Amino acid sequence: MKKKTLAAMLAVSMVAAGVAGCGGGSSATETTAATQAAEPAAPEAKEEADATEAPAKAEAPADGKVIRVGIINNDPNESGYRTANDADLKAMFTEANGYEASFAYSLKNDEQITAAQKFIQDEVDYLLLSAADTSGWDSVLQDAQDAGIGVILFDRTIDASEDLYLASIVSDMDKEGQTAVDWLAGQGLDEYNIIHLQGVMGSAAQQGRTGALDEKVAAEASWNLVTQQTAEWNSEKAQQIVQSVIDSGTSFNVIYAENDDMAKGAVAALDKANISHGVGKDVIVMGFDCNKWALQELLDQNWNYDGQCNPFQASYIDKVIKDVEAGNMPAEKTIIMEEKGFDATEITADDVEKYGI
Amino acid sequence: MTGKKSIGTENKFADLFRRQIFIPIAALLLLALFNLVVDPSFFKITLGHNSVGDPVLTGYLMTILDYGSEVAILAIGMTLVTAASGGQDISVGAAVAIAGSVILRVLVGLGGDGTLQAPILVGFLAACVVAMLFGAFNGVLVAIFRIQPMVATLILYTAGRSIAAWINNNELPIITDKGFTVFGGFIPGIPIPTPFFLAVLCVVIALLVLKFTNLGLYTQAVGINSSSSRLNGLNPTFIKWLSFVILGLCVAVVGLIKTSRLSTINYSVIAKDIEMDAILAVALGGNVLSGGKFNIMASILGAYVIQFLTTTLYKFNVSSDALPAYKAVVVIMLVVISAPTVKEKLGAWGRSLKKQKGAA
C-alpha cells in the first residue's frame, strides 16, 4: 500500500513538467499544470497591450470579401507572453479589418490537430497555427493544402516540409541572447562574475539565451560564471539559487536571468542581503520578455537591461495574408520578427507603455 | 549492579531507536555532520542589514529556517490528512496558488495600481475561507464519496492553477505596499525571518489543540480502523473531512508567505511540487503513510531536514533540476526501511544477535 502510494506520488511529480517563459519552439518541455483548453473570456482585460504594435487598423478589402481564418493557439493562461499574443491576434482579426476569425486553444498537440481538422472542414481561408509540439503535423497540413487552405505558422516552428506552409513567423532566440550579451560586453566592466539563471532546459528560449552567453564566457578570460543553474522560469527557485550564492560569500556583479520572473526572484534575494543593484550600483540585473512591471523596474533604475521576446505577430501575419491575396507569395518562408533590448539609462515611459506585455 | 545499569542504557538506546522521531533526528545529524566535515562555513551566520536598513541574520542556517518553515506549516495539515484518511493531498501547491491569488485579488483588486485596497488581515481571512472551502471539497470527495485521496485531490491539482489565474482574470497584480513584505521577509528590528515565527505559531496552536481536545486520539482511531471507530461512537466521515479543512488553513498561511516574498505570484509555478516536499516530510517523520499513528513534531522536523538537504545541494551547485532525483533517493530509502518485510528481517536479525549474546 505504502509502496504503491509513493510510486504514484513520484509518477505524478514527473508528469508535472516545466512552464514556459517566452513561447519557444521545442515544446516537449513546455507544458503547464493548466492543461485545460482555455476559457476565451480571459484576454479582454489586456487589450490595451496590443493596440500599440498592431499598427493602424488594416482596411477592409474593397470588394467586401471577408477572409475567414482559423487560429490555433496555446492556452492564454500559460504566461504573460501568451496573453499578450492572444490579445494581439484578437485585436487584428476582427470584422472591421475584414476577417472572420475562429479561435481554438490547447496546450496539447492532439487537441490542436483535432481543431485543425475541424477548421479544414469548415473551409476557412487561412489556418494560423502556434503548435504545442513540433511533430505530428504532416498529414493534417497536407489535408489543408489539398483543400486550398493557406497555413501560416506563428511563434513556434514545426518539423514538417516547408512546402506545407506559406510562412513561419518566429522570434530568433539566438539573436535575443546575442543582443543581450553584446549589451553586457558594452558595459566595460573589468571583470564579469555572472550568476546565470536558466529557463526550463531544452526550451528554445533557454537554448538561444544561454548559447550566446556560454560562447562569450568561453572566449573571454575576464568573464566567469559564478553559478549556472536552471530556475525553470520560476522566481522562487531563482531566489533560492541567488540566496545560496550570497550565503556562500562568493562575489558577483551580474545577474543574467533568462526571464523577468527569475530576475525578480534574484533581486528579492539581493534586497534581503543589502546588495545594491541597478544603474551605477554593484550588481547589473538583466531579464527577458519585457513584462510591463519589469520595464517599470528599468525605468526606476533598479534593473539594467530587459530583452524583448516579441509576442505581437498579428501585424506580420496580416501582411502575409494581404500579400498572398494580392498574388505575391512571401519571398522568405521564415520571417524573423524585430526584437529590441532595453537599457535602463535610455528607456522612456512611452517604451514601457508601448512594449510592455 | 553494573549489569543492571548496562541493561538500562541498552533499553534506553533501543527505546530511542524505536521512537518515531529517531529517523528525522538521525537524518538531520547526518546532514549536519556531512556539512561540518566538508565545509564548516556552512554554519556561519552573520548579522547584516537588508536594503531597507533593518537588521537581518543571513547564512545557510537562516535560509533553512526561512524556506523550511513553509513546508513545516503544510506538514502539520498533511500529517493529519495522512493519519485520518490513509492517503495524501497532492493539490496543496495548486491550492497555495489559489490562496495567493485570493490575497492579491482582495488587497489590490482588478486593474489596481498596487496600493492596498483592504487591510492585509481581510485579505488573509478571505484566503483562509477560500482555502478551507477547497479543503472541504477535497474532504467531501474523500470522506463521503470514499474516493482514494490521491485521486480525489488530483482534480484540484489539475484545475487549481487555472482557477488561480481566473480569480485575477489572468492578470498578475503586484502589491507595492512595503508593509506587506513582512510575512515573507523580516519584522523590522527582528533579525530572524518571519516565516519561522509563523511556523512556530502554527505548531503551537496545533499542539495545543491536540493536547486539549480529543482530535489526536480520534484521528488516530479513524486512521487505524475506520469502521471500528464508528462502532465506538466516532464519526469517521467528519474526522477525515476536518483534516482536509485544517490542511486548507495551513495552505492559506503558506499562500500568505509565498505572496509576501515577492509581493506577487506566478500562478503556474508558485509552490510547484511543494506537496511532494510536504508528503516527504510526513514520510521522513516516520509516520505511517497508510494512516493511523502520527507524530506532528516528527513531521515538522522532517520538513526542516528536507530544506536542509535542498540547501546543502544548492550549496554544492547541484543542478536544480536534479534536486528531485536526490529527494527520490531519500524516499526510496525510507520506503525500503519501513517496508514490513525489511522490518521483520531486521527484527529477526536483532533477536538472533541478542540470543548469541545470551549464549555467550
Image: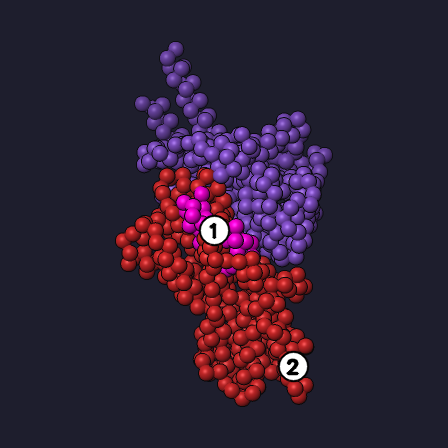
Chain colours: A red, B purple
The residue under the point 63% across, 28% down is B208
Q: Position of residue B245 (x, y in %)?
A: 66, 42
| Nearer to us in this view, B187 or B220 | B187
Q: Is residue A288 magenta?
A: yes
- The amino acid pointed to by label 2 is Ala
Tell whether A133 sits left or right of A71.
left
Which badge, 2 or 1, is on the more N-terminal residue? 2
Q: Is residue A158 above or below residue B356?
A: below
Quarter holding the C terminus of chain B is top left
Type of the residue with mark 1: Trp
Q: Residue at x 37, y 54 (%)?
A: A187
CA neighbours of label 1 inside 10 A, class few (<14), some (14 to 19), many (20+)? many
In this figure, which residue is indicated by the disc labeled 1? A303
Check the picture and name the quadrant holding the N terminus of chain B.
top left
Q: Quadrant of residue A102?
A: bottom right
SS assignment at label 1:
loop
Give the chain of mark 2. Answer: A
Q: Is residue A66 above or below residue A313?
A: below
Q: Label 2 vs label 1: CA separation? A: 43 Å
The residue singled out by tag 2 in the image is A60
Q: Which residues are magenta?
A: A276-300
Determine the chain carrying the residue at label 1. Answer: A
Under tag 2, what secondary structure?
Answer: loop
